[in-house]
Image (cartoon, rainbow, N blue to C red):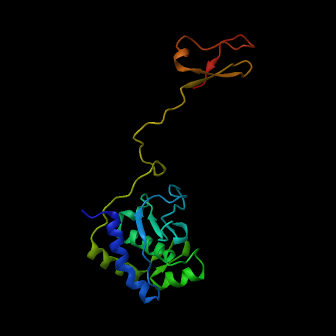
Amino acid sequence: MKTRERWLLEAIEGVSPLFRAAGFELPVVKVSVGFPPIGGLKKNRRVLGVCFPKTMTKDDVPQIFINPTVEEIESEQGVLAILVHELVHACGIHGHGKSFRKLAVAVGLTGQMRSTVASDWLQDELKGLVRKIGPFPGAAIVSRMDGADSPVKRDKCRMNKCICTDCGYTARVAKKWLEFGAPVCPCCHVQMRTSE
C-alpha cells in the first residue's frame, strides 16, 4: 500500500513540469501530512498547508505539511491544489506578494493568493495526475472543533454551586456532600439552595 508521503512525492514529480514551464526548477522537498504550527484547528480560516523554507530546516531542505483536517483531503485535486500552493513557497518565494502571484498564476492557481484554488485548466491537469498516481491514501481527521464526538467525555465540574437566597452568598460543594444536605449560609444562617 502506498503511503501518503510516497503519494505526495509522486504528485510533486507530476507537477514539476508546470513549474519548469514557468521557469522554475522545483527544489528537493520533504512533504507529509501534519498539523501546521498555528491555525491548524481554527474553525474559520483554517491553515490548509504550510511550507517551512530551507532557512528554517537544519538540512536546508524545505518541508511541506498538508493539514489532515481539511476537507480537501477528501478530494485528490484539493490536496494537489494545496500542494502546488506550498511548492510555490518551496521555490523560495515568501509571502503572497507579486512574486508569489506571478508564479502561482503561471502554474494554474487562481483566487486570492493567501488561499488559492486550482484554475479550470489546472484542475484538468490534476485529474490526469490522479489517474496516474491513484487515489490519495488517507482520509481527513475530524476534530472536535468540527463537531466530532470526543472518544473521552470531558469531565464536567463536580462542584455544585449553592446560593443563599437572602444575601446572595455562594459556595461550591461536592455532589457527594449535597446528599447530606446543602450548607448553611455563614452570615444569614439559612440553608442555601443549589443552582445547578
Quarter of the image where one finds residue 5: bottom left
Q: Please indicate whether residue 84 sits to the left or right of residue 42 in the image.
A: left
Q: Please indicate whether residue 47 sits to the left or right of residue 138 in the image.
A: right
Which residue is more in the foreground, 79 or 29? 29
Which residue is more in the foreground, 50 or 154? 50
Could you tell me which residue is drawn at 51 percent across and 63 percent down? 47
Locate the C terminus and report the quarter of the image it occupies: top right
Q: Position of residue 13 (x, y in %)?
A: 35, 78
Residue 112 visible? The answer is no
Locate the N terminus and report the quarter of the image it occupies: bottom left
Which residue is more in the foreground, 59 or 38? 59
Q: Please indicate whether residue 7 sits to the left or right of residue 98 in the image.
A: left
Spot the residue most to the front: 59
Could you tell me which residue is drawn at 31 percent across and 77 percent down? 129
Q: Position of residue 140 (x, y in %)?
A: 38, 58
Could you tell me which residue is drawn at 52 percent across and 77 percent down? 111
